Every structure is written in structure tokens, then in C-alpha cells.
């Protein structure tokens, strides 16, 4: 089970990753992940697609997540960052069919600059998560 921390608590604990320097897509892996999360493919079982595929727009979301967003420590011990990006930041697709809207940007593999990438996520899919330190609700689903 994942553990969550609100932005202020994770910062007070010293979790402040470096922001990306240079181009957002620096490796072949990052370019492939960008394509996966910006181009709908009917052959993909599941995709989270950004509504605006531009790296300039996505970079803002990544920087927001890394600088002040909530932190998730997943069941594998990996540290991910999430930020509320607003209605319409992206959609979930299954086999090329749009299923639901998504409001969050999630940055995964944050400790590896060459593998770090991002995708959209729905608040409702995370469930009601609270900060492990202060108990604050991280995101409130409107559904």
C-alpha cells in the first residue's frame, strides 16, 4: 500500500527533487513515454493521454509536481509526485476509447533523471488519500 504526504509535509521532511534542466525529453525512453502519453493508440490496453501534448505545457505540470506537489511512496519504495492540474488535463483511454477525464499529473521514477516521466491520473482512481504526517486530505474528487 502506498503512503502519501502533502506538499508542505514532504518538503519539511527534505523531499525536494531537482527540477529538470534542459529539455524535458532527454532520453529515448522519455521520448517513447511522451509519445505513449500524448498519442492515442488503439492497440494499447490502457493509456493516460495529456490533452495538450506540448512539452512546454507538460513541463509546467512536472515542475509544479516536483516543487510543491504531494508525494507518493509506492509499495515498491519508489517516490512519485502528484499535482492537481485541473479538469481536462488529460483522459484515460482503453483500447483507444476515451473512458474518463483526469485531473492530476503524476511524475514517476523521480530519482532517475533519464527515466523520469509523467502521465495524467484521475483523483477518483487514487481514492481518498490523506497525508501520512498531518492527516490533510490530498485531493478531493468531485464525483
Image (cartoon, grey):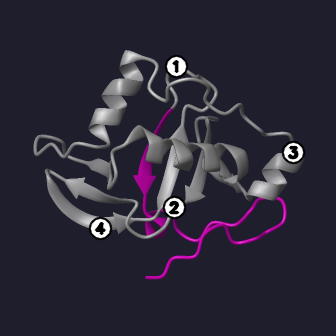
Q: Nearer the viewer, residue 4 or 10?
A: 10
Identify the image quadrant of the C terminus: bottom left
11 relative to 53 in the view: left or right: right
- How far, Cα to Cα, is label 1 from label 4? 30 Å
Q: Residues within 10 Å of mark 2 (few under 14, many from 20)?
A: many
Residue at numbered disc 2: 85
- How far, Cα to Cα, is label 2 from label 4? 15 Å
- In magenta, the rendered stretch is 117-143
As helix, strand or loop, the secondary structure at mark 1 comes to loop
As helix, strand or loop, the secondary structure at mark 2 comes to loop
Looking at the image, which residue is at 75% across and 56% down?
Answer: 7
Mark 1, mark 4: which one is toward the viewer? 1
Q: Nearer the viewer, residue 60 or 43?
A: 60
> Quick one: label 1 or label 2, which is nearer the N terminus?
2
Residue 27: image location, x then y, percent: 43, 17
- How far, Cα to Cα, is label 1 from label 2? 23 Å
Residue at numbered disc 4: 100
Residue at numbered disc 3: 13
Residue 51 picture quarter: bottom left
Residue 108: image location, x then y, percent: 53, 38
5 relative to 133 in the view: left or right: left
- How far, Cα to Cα, is label 4 from label 3? 34 Å
Q: Which mark is residue 74?
A: none
Q: Residues within 10 Å of mark 4 (few under 14, many from 20)?
A: some
Mark 3, mark 2: which one is toward the viewer? 2
Looking at the image, which residue is at 58% across and 71% down?
Answer: 128
Amino acid at each position: 500500500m502506498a503512503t502519501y504526504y502533502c506538499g508542505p509535509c514532504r518538503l519539511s521532511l527534505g523531499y525536494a527533487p531537482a527540477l529538470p534542466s534542459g529539455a524535458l525529453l532527454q532520453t529515448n525512453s522519455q521520448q517513447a513515454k511522451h509519445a505513449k502519453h500524448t498519442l492515442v493508440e488503439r492497440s494499447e490496453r490502457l493509456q493516460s493521454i495529456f490533452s495538450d501534448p506540448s512539452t512546454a505545457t507538460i513541463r509546467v505540470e512536472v515542475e509544479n509536481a516536483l516543487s510543491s506537489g504531494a508525494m507518493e511512496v509506492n509499495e515498491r519504495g519508489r517516490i512519485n509526485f502528484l499535482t492537481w492540474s485541473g479538469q481536462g488535463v488529460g483522459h484515460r483511454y482503453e483500447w483507444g476509447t476515451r473512458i474518463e477525464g483526469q485531473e492530476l499529473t503524476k511524475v514517476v521514477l523521480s530519482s532517475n533523471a533519464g527515466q523520469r516521466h509523467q502521465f495524467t491520473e484521475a483523483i477518483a482512481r487514487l481514492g481518498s488519500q490523506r497525508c501520512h504526517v498531518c492527516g490533510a486530505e490530498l485531493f478531493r474528487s468531485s464525483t
